[in-house]
Structures are given as structure tokens and as C-alpha cells.
Image (tube, rainbow, N blue to C red):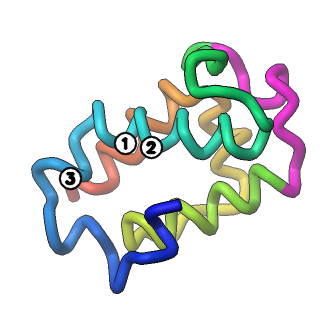
Amino acid sequence: MTEATATGPVAATAPDTVTSPQAICSWLVDRVAYYLDRTPAEIDKGTELAEMGLDSVYALTLCGDIEDRFGLVVEPTMAWDHPTIDAITVYLTTELAR
């Protein structure tokens, strides 16, 4: 995965292309697909992560990946507070714009 090769918060190096809502959503779809051992095409951005089978371990892992990728500190409850990929995308876009 590309996040293993990052040398720092990606948002600091390319904010326009990496932190656009489309880029964030695409990255989230890829991560969730990876965790669930599915293809990105099988991921419905409007379905709750828990309904798709994402458990608490992967939800916490997603929080850590978000922190690494975007340089944000997110609460461990983020996946429950924003239970869909669409909701997380809006949340991250807002936080990154601050």
C-alpha cells in the first residue's frame, strides 16, 4: 500500500490533490476494501461500515491509517460517529480545511 512509503503527512505535501473529497473518498474505499478482502467496486460508500462487516479492530486500524495518511488526530470512535465512507469523507474534508 502507498501509505507505507509516505515520509510524512501527505496533506502537507499536496493538499489540492490528496485531500480533495474525491481523493479522500477513493482512499477510504481502497482501505475498507482491503480490510474486508473485497474489491473497491464492492464497497458501497453509503452503507454503514459495521453493516459491511468492518469490526472494531479494523475501525481502530482505519483511525490510525487516517492519522498516518493525513496527519490528523482522530477519535477512536470516529467510525461510529461517522459510520459511512461518505460521512467520514465529509468529516475529514472539513477537518483538513481548518
At x 55%, y 30%, the residue is 85
Mark 2 or 3: in front is: 2
Above or below, comparing residue 60 to residue 17 in the picture: below
Camera-side residue: 42 or 52? 42
Residue 38 in percent (x, y) is at 73, 29
Q: Earlier in the sequence, mark 1 or mark 3?
A: 1
Picture residue at 68% right of the left edge, 43% below the top = 34
- Mark 2 — residue? 27
Q: Identify the disc placed on residue 24.
A: 1
Q: Which mark is residue 97?
A: 3
**Percent x, y of residue 84:** 61, 27
For residue 72, side relative to residue 65 (left or right): left
Q: Residue furthest bottom?
A: 7
Report the mark closest to the observer, 1 or 3. Answer: 1
Q: Is residue 87 magenta?
A: no
Q: Amino acid at mark 3?
A: Ala
Marks 2/1 in contact by CB < 8 Å: the verdict is yes
- The amino acid type, in three-letter code, at marker 2 is Trp
Q: Secondary structure at mark 1?
A: helix
- Total count of labels: 3
**Dot 2: within a 10 Å radius of its alpha carbon, few (fewer than 14), some, or many (20 or more) residues?**
some
